[in-house]
Image (cartoon, helix red, strand yellow):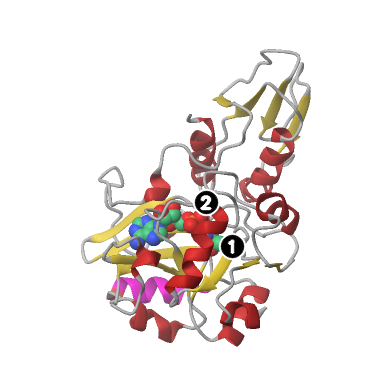
């Protein structure tokens, strides 16, 4: 694994959020292979995963708030966007003056990152615009034949991507909702209006998309013989196939099951998937953000 990374190859690995496709973040050639394998446009910057906190000031200019956030939430599912240092290759930041950084809490990821000893650029290990993988089998379905290795660490604990927050002296701006919630972050610094765009290509309106058309409804009703239901906690009448995110209405469990359930419905040969709206509190906001994007196209 580490030999492959050192040779500039991309390797798929589990993180606590979703599987990532990792490569040497300080090697533009290695990073180029990530874009190639994913069919990802070069305009979409990568998240850099650091093996230890001493890399934070080497790659960015951390503000006091950033250091506090790192102390509180790392290792874990929080990505911070900060001013970059020149050592960070342009291909990683898509030429922007900021870089996105996080430290993964997954034991296998940490083990590989520590052995490699350098930062790893790692986007989610799916083809561009598709559903993020939460198991090694999902990665295989997305990238078979395009990458040399997949490290199998079982299913991902959170199941949705990290929270991304832009950190500046004025405050925090959430660029992508995730497992670290708005409420978690508000305790640290003022949350700025996130409708004011800081360029986050992940902010693309359509993303996380199944191939089957998906609509989001408060009270789902079947439209045809071949309508599938992505339900929050209970089944409904008349659907050809149903996936339940959490029978106990547990939002964390729903997040962990979201992408696997979307994938199963997508593979069922349906005409339409109707997703039920879920409560937008805590991590529910992040789930709804994904569902809105899956529905937008
Ligand atoms: O949980 C995660 O964050 C996973 C795991 C593998 O760590 N990674 C992940 O990466 O979701 P990716 O590439 O699928 O999504 C990263 C998002 C992209 O939408 C990108 O546009 C945004 O982060 N991003 C990266 N660098 C940025 C920057 N400097 N400014 C704003 N957005 C940035
Ligand atoms: Mg992604």
Region in magenta: 65-75
Q: Quadrant of ligand 1?
A: bottom left
Q: Secondary structure at mark 1?
A: strand
**Residue in the image at 65% along x and 63% along y:** 147
Q: CB at mark 2 closer than 8 A to ligand 2? A: no
Q: Earlier in the sequence, mark 1 or mark 2?
A: 1
**Residue in the image at 27% along x and 47% along y:** 197
- Residue at the limit of the structure toward the top, as seen here: 224
Question: How far apart in space, not on screen, are marks 1 and 2 (Cα)?
Answer: 15 Å
**Residue in the image at 74% along x and 35% along y:** 267
**Residue corresponding to mark 2:** 39
- Residue at the limit of the structure toward the left, as seen here: 170
Quadrant of residue 14 within the rendered picture: bottom right
Q: Nearer the viewer, residue 260 or 147?
A: 147
Q: CB at mark 1 closer than 8 A to ligand 1? A: yes
Q: In the picture, which quadrant includes the N terminus?
A: bottom right
Q: Secondary structure at mark 2?
A: loop
Picture coordinates of residue 57, whole percent (x, y):
34, 82
| Residue 162 seen in the current view | no
Picture coordinates of residue 232, whole percent (x, y):
66, 35
Picture coordinates of residue 176, whole percent (x, y):
43, 51
**Residue corresponding to mark 1:** 20
Mark 1 or 2, closer to the camera: 2
The secondary structure that dominates the magenta segment is helix
- In the figure, 69 relative to 243: above or below? below
Lateral position of residue 205 relative to residue 36, left or right: left
- In the figure, 65 relative to 293: above or below? below
Q: Is residue 196 magenta?
A: no
């Amino acid at each position: 694994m580490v030999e492959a990374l050192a040779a500039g190859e991309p390797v798929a690995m589990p993180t606590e959020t979703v599987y990532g496709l990792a490569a040497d973040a300080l090697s533009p050639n290695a990073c180029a292979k990530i874009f190639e394998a994913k069919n990802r446009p070069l305009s979409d910057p990568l998240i850099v995963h650091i093996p230890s906190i001493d890399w934070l000031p080497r790659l960015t200019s951390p503000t006091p708030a950033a250091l506090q956030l790192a102390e509180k939430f790392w290792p874990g599912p929080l990505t911070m966007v900060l001013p970059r240092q020149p050592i960070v290759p342009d291909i990683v930041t898509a030429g922007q003056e900021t870089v996105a950084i996080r430290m993964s809490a997954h034991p296998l990821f940490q083990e590989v990152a520590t052995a490699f000893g350098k930062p790893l650029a790692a986007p989610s290990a799916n083809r561009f615009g598709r559903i993020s993988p939460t198991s090694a089998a999902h990665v295989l379905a997305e990238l078979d034949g395009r990458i040399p290795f997949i490290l199998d660490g079982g299913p991902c604990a959170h199941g949705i991507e990290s929270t991304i927050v832009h950190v500046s002296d004025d405050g925090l701006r959430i660029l992508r909702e995730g497992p670290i919630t708005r409420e978690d972050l508000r305790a640290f610094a003022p949350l700025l209006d996130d409708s004011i765009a800081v360029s986050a290509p992940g902010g693309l309106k359509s993303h996380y998309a199944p191939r089957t058309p998906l609509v989001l409804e408060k009270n789902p009703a079947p439209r045809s013989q071949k309508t599938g239901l992505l339900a929050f906690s209970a089944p409904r009448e008349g659907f050809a196939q149903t996936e339940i995110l959490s029978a106990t209405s547990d939002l964390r469990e729903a997040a962990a099951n979201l992408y696997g359930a979307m994938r199963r419905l997508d593979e069922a040969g349906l005409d339409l998937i109707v997703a039920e709206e879920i409560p937008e509190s805590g991590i529910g906001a992040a789930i709804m953000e994904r569902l809105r994007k899956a529905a937008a196209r």
